[in-house]
Amino acid sequence: MACESYTQNMNQPRVFTFGAKIKKLRATLQTAFIGCQIEHHSQVASTNDIALARGKTGAAEGTLIIAEHQTAGRGRYGRSWEAPSGKCLLVSVILRHRLLRDQIALPNLIGAMAIAKAIRITQGLDARIKMPNDVRIEKKKVAGVLTELAYDEAGQPFLVLGFGVNVNCVLDDFPLELRETATSVRMAYALSENENPEICRASLLCDILRHLEQSYLQLKTGETDLIMNQFEVLRENEGSH
C-alpha cells in the first residue's frame, strides 16, 4: 500500500465515509469489521474520549477514531501519553463484547499482541510485551494500550481499545526524561539495519488491525488458552526493566 498523508486543517475533523484515500485504506484492510467506519482528526484531546462518546450513542463495532495529535492522551492510572504530531499511530477502536470476569485483562493483552506481531512481521524487530500493556523493543517502550469499559444508551456494555505507537519519532521528539526508556519503530529499525527510512504508518496500522481482529474473534469465542499461548511467545523475559 502506498503511504499517504491524512492531514487536514487543525481542529476540523473529517469523517472518512467516502473518498479515494479511505477507499484505498479500506481496500487494503484485511478485516471483516474493524475499520467499518473511520473518523479522522488532526487534533483531539483523546481518541478514547471520542470513541467512548461515539460508543454511547450506538456507533458500530469496529469503528475507528484516528488522530494526528492528542493534547490529553493518557495511559494506565491517568498517566499522560506524549506523541509528536504526525509521527505516531493514535487510534481507538470500539468493540462490543460483554467481557466475562476472567477476560477483563485480555483486551489490553490482545492490543499489545497485535502491535508486537505487526512490528515483528513488517520490520523484523524483536518487539515484546511487558505486562500488562506495553510493547517494547530492546527494553524501550514503543507502544502502549489502554482499554476502557462503558455502557451505551441502551444499557449495553462496550469497550474502547486505544493504542499509541511511536512510529517515525526521532530522539529529539522525546522529552529528556524519556530518551533512555522510549523508542520508535523507525529508531529501532535504524539501529538494527543501519538504515533510517520513514515507516509507512498506514501500512503498519493495517497490519495491527488485522492481528487485532484475529485475536478479538478468539476472545469472543472464548479461546483464552490460545490467546495466552500466543502471549507467552511474545512476552518479555522476566527481570527486564
Image (spheres, rainbow, N blue to C red):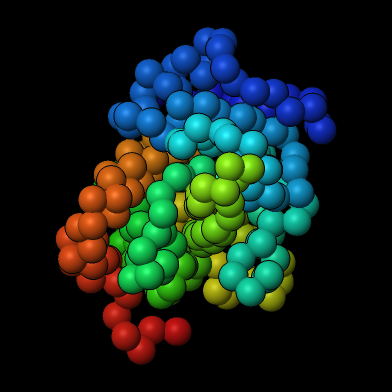
Residue 104 at x, y percent in the picture: 41, 67
* Residue sitting at x 61%, y 65%: 75
From the viewer's perspective, is residue 37 above or below residue 154? above
- The part of the image, by quadrant, that contains residue 53 is top right
**Lateral position of residue 126 relative to residue 45, left or right:** left
Residue extending farthest to the front is 154
Name the residue located 23 percent from the left edge and 50 percent from the top edge.
221
Q: Where the N terminus falls, by quadrant? A: top left
Residue nearest the viewer, comparing 89 with 200: 89
Left or right, 72 with reference to 83: right
Name the spot of residue 209 as percent of width and height, x first: 39, 40
In the depicted structure, whether residue 145 falls above or below residue 86 = below
Looking at the image, which is closer to me, 44 or 226? 226
Which residue is at a point 46% across and 37% down the rendered structure image? 61
Query: Which residue is at the front of the view, 195 or 100?
Result: 100
Q: Quadrant of residue 67 in the image? A: top right
Q: Can you give x and y, in whole percent of width and height, for residue 226 in the image?
A: 17, 60
Q: State the count of labels.
A: 0
Taking the image as drawn, is residue 204 in sight? no
Q: Is residue 176 above or below residue 29?
A: below
Instruction: State the image coordinates of residue 51 (x, y, percent, origin top left).
Output: 62, 43
Q: Residue at x 45, y 84 (%)?
A: 241
Residue 231, above or below 54:
below
Camera-nearest residue between 4 and 17? 17
Left or right: where does residue 200 sit relative to residue 209? right
